[in-house]
């Protein structure tokens, strides 16, 4: 496990290396450290702006080699945004290190958590939150697949779909309360009146009754959040979604009730 001092020392070393790399024209601290919200579990989040004409692939390759050889990286993955590559490293100490390698034109603040260390930041479009209408759509799509999974007796798949349905509800609720909606980042800031009912969506067993109960609760939560986005759409969705949660009592689709 890493310590705060070790994390700070690594961040300082990476910034110093960036200053010494002629292919990097700017650097910024991002994430929780940029907003004064860093705690004992925070990552190292940095953004580097590449010099005009710098070979992005070569820069990333060199920095990746250094992360493995000098700083104990054991794995990494890439998260692209536009032409910027966010390379995410896992260190042996369990520390996560995120480094954005941005072409010069894309080096700038896409969120309030951006503190420039050196160089010039460009005016770039901020990262947009997920669209509420799309979340509602994904919600009813997950609901359809949750229903079919339950009726087919596929408990694990039903669990996956119910969890996906709840994720859309959480994101919608975060948007409604002006909280970060990506990856559940704002969920712990939601009022208890929103989160308490969602406890009923948690699936602790794969028997039919438990799955149907969780599915019904998640469906009602989706309808409640959809009503904030588009009341008319929520009203149109209510009939078919509630019909799906009643399937166990009225007989599965395509079958005559016994």
Image: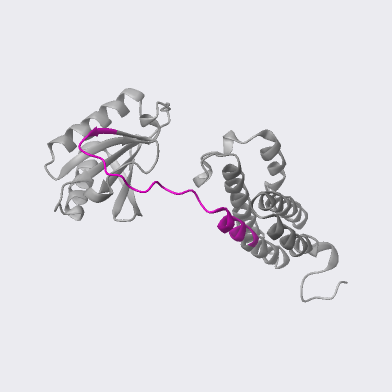
Q: In the rendered view of the protein, which quadrant contains the N terminus?
A: top left
Q: Viewer-proximal residue, 249 or 225?
A: 225
Q: Which residues are magenta?
A: 116-140
Instruction: Locate residue 236, reporting x and y percent.
Output: 73, 63
Q: Quadrant of residue 192?
A: top right
Q: How is the image coloured?
A: one colour
Residue 29 lies left or right of residue 249; in this view the side is left
Q: Quadrant of residue 139?
A: bottom right
Vertical placement of residue 123 versus 248, above or below: above
Reply yes or no: does residue 137 show up in magenta.
Answer: yes
Residue at 60% over, 43% down: 176
Check the image and name the residue furthest to the top.
5
Check the image and name the residue furthest to the right.
258
Residue 201 lies left or right of residue 83; in this view the side is right
Residue 203 lies left or right of residue 111; in this view the side is right
Instruction: Locate residue 32, reporting x and y percent.
Output: 40, 32
Q: In the rendered view of the protein, which quadrant contains the C terminus?
A: bottom right
Q: Is residue 193 visible?
A: yes
Residue at 27% over, 45% down: 107
Q: Viewer-proximal residue, 227 or 82?
A: 227
Vertical placement of residue 170 versus 253, above or below: above
Q: Quadrant of residue 8?
A: top left
Instruction: Locate residue 205, reporting x and y percent.
Output: 70, 50
Instruction: Locate residue 43, reporting x and y percent.
Output: 37, 35
Residue 256 lies left or right of residue 223; in this view the side is right
């Amino acid at each position: 496990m890493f310590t705060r001092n070790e994390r700070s020392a690594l961040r300082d070393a990476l910034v110093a290396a960036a200053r010494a790399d002629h292919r990097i024209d700017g650097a910024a601290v991002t994430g929780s450290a940029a907003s004064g919200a860093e705690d004992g579990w925070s990552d190292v989040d940095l953004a580097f702006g590449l010099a005009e004409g710098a070979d992005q692939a070569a820069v990333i390759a060199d920095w990746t080699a250094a992360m493995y050889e000098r700083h104990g990286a054991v794995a990494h993955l890439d998260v692209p945004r536009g032409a910027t590559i966010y390379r995410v490293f896992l260190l042996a100490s369990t520390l996560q290190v995120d480094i954005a390698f941005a072409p010069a034109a894309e080096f700038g603040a896409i969120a309030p958590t951006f503190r420039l260390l050196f160089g010039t930041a460009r005016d770039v479009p901020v990262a947009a939150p997920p669209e509420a209408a799309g979340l509602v759509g994904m919600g009813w799509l997950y609901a359809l697949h949750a229903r079919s999974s339950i009726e087919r007796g596929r408990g694990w798949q039903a669990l996956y779909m119910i969890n996906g349905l709840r994720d859309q509800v959480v994101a919608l609720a975060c948007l409604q309360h002006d909280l970060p909606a990506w990856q559940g980042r704002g969920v712990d800031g939601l009022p208890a009146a929103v989160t308490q009912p969602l406890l009923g969506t948690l699936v602790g067993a794969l028997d039919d009754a438990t799955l149907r109960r969780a599915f019904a609760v998640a469906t009602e939560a989706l309808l409640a959040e959809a009503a904030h986005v588009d009341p008319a759409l929520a009203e149109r969705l209510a009939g078919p979604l509630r019909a799906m949660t009643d399937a166990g009592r009225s007989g599965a689709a395509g079958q005559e009730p016994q």
